[in-house]
Amino acid sequence: MAKHHIAATVNGDPVEFLCETEDTLLDVLRDTLNLTGSKEGCASGDCGACSVMLDGRLVCSCLVLGAEMNGKKVETIEGMATGEQLHPLQQQFLKHAALQCGICTPGFLVAAKALLERNTHPSETEVRYWLAGNLCRCTGYDKIVTAVMDTAAAMRKG
Amino acid sequence: MRYEAPDSLEGAVALLAGAKGETRVLAGGTDLLVQMRADILDPDLIVDIKKIPETRAITEEKGGWRIGAAVTGAELKEHPRLKKVWPGVIEAANLIGSTQIQGRATMGGNLCNGSPAADSVPALIAAGALATLAGPNGKRDLPVEDVMLGPRKLALQKGEIVASFLLPPRPPRSSDAYLRFIPRTEMDIAVVGAGVSLTVDSAGAVTAARVSLGAVAARVLLVAEAAQAIVGSRLDKPAQDRLEAAARAACRPIDDKRGTVEFRIQVAGVLARRAALIALDRARSN
């Protein structure tokens, strides 16, 4: 079986790649496009470490095939900062020490950004439910939730 | 492993009907990719149905609603009108997995994954939904309760796919509800699920009802006796007791790590009653 020839957009840049049917979007991002910010935790859609935006939707990239990507727009953690300027969420995660080992952090940041783009004033409950598909074994979540809430408050003030 | 993404139902059916070896339909992929990764499945052909317009649309039809099999949970949640008419169906679909899973997971996939614990299936059955199948001999409609025969066993013939669901027209003062029991608040598989859809008259008495239970048998059950137990009543305490008893009598669950037989039977009655009361409350305010 010939490989699939895919043309997609990743973080605003047009990309072309070849993949096998069984390659996931996560495989393609990490191993073909060398975008290793998205992590593989569980490979079953439970942990959220591989979270990316696919045509504006938050998804687990381990549950998407690379072969599905023709004409699709993907946004990953690598597209979050603007040059050296960190996204406000990234700044607040640092300020609140909302990470320790860091494996879950890219997924949390991508997922939290998706929330704040839809809801500029989330309640703590809304933050916790939105992020229920992102697992963290270091922080106990409170610091992450606080960082997201503080970012939302800061972004509302402009 | 071959991957195809046809843009028509006919194209998908022709690929599946003509294929040798194992085939799988790809909608959201949230079950399929996990099973492939775990080496439970190794299909020779994957047919992605998301490029087929019928599988991706939500449209009004004959006073009811047609929902494409590959519409995602997130899209159902965002629809401006569906939640008002079918709150139980939407809340059931939205209980599946996390935000990330909701971005991909579909009701077509939830049904065709063939799990008795699928959350959207009891709600669809309670709603009286039809599954519209496309196959080598054209289209046919099957009540959702007749699609699944047992764990991982479907009534689909070779080459047939679930293209969409048709939710029937809603009389005034009708509503539905779905509840499940899980041992935490989010991100789990139903130990028991209960869907109830009902209609009340202007005096508040139940004139029609459908009750469906998930995860208490080898397939999701439509429990006619539970519906009969409340039709004609105002869901007062005796009717609630009859509903609970009928729901429990229909259960034929298994013991597993998520719940015992005894627990599942007990909870099935409780959830059927609570779901009926929520549906009643919603119906009376419609």
Image (cartoon, rainbow, N blue to C red):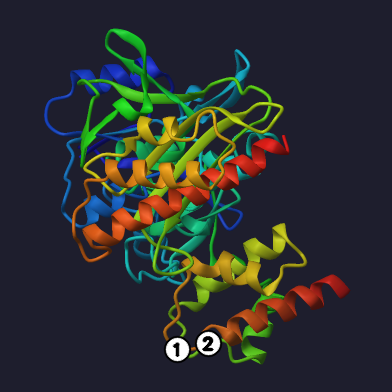
Q: Is residue A3 left or right of residue B238?
A: left
Residue A99 badge: 2
Name the amino acid type tagged 1. Cys
Circle 2 Cα neighbour tier, 10 Å, few/some/many (<14 / 14–19 / ≥20) = many
Q: Look at 39% across and 68% down and name the residue there.
A: B183
- Residue in view at x 45 percent, y 88 percent: A138
Residue A138 is labelled as 1
Q: Are marks 1 and 2 in contact (CB under 8 Å)?
A: yes
Of residues A49 and B240, the one nearer the viewer is B240
In front here: B135 or B12? B135
Judge if badges 1 and 2 mark residues of a common chain.
yes
Who comes first in sequence, dot 1 or dot 2? 2
* Pair 1/2: label in front: 1
Chain of the residue under the numbered disc 2 shown in the image: A
Which residue type does callout 2 highlight?
Leu
Please identify the quadrant where the N terminus of chain B is shown. Answer: top left
Outermost residue on the left side: it is B21
Q: Position of residue B213 (x, y in %)?
A: 36, 43
Residue A123 in the image, given as x and y percentages of width and height: 71, 70
| Residue B221 quadrant | top left
Q: How many marks?
A: 2
Quadrant where the C terminus of chain B sits is: top right
Q: Is residue A21 above or below residue A35?
A: above
Q: Indicate the position of residue A62 as horizontal and vertical percent values.
A: 37, 58
The answer to whether residue B121 of the structure is visible from this angle is: no
Image position of B169 with respect to A3: above or below: above
Say whether residue B174 is left or right of residue A43: right
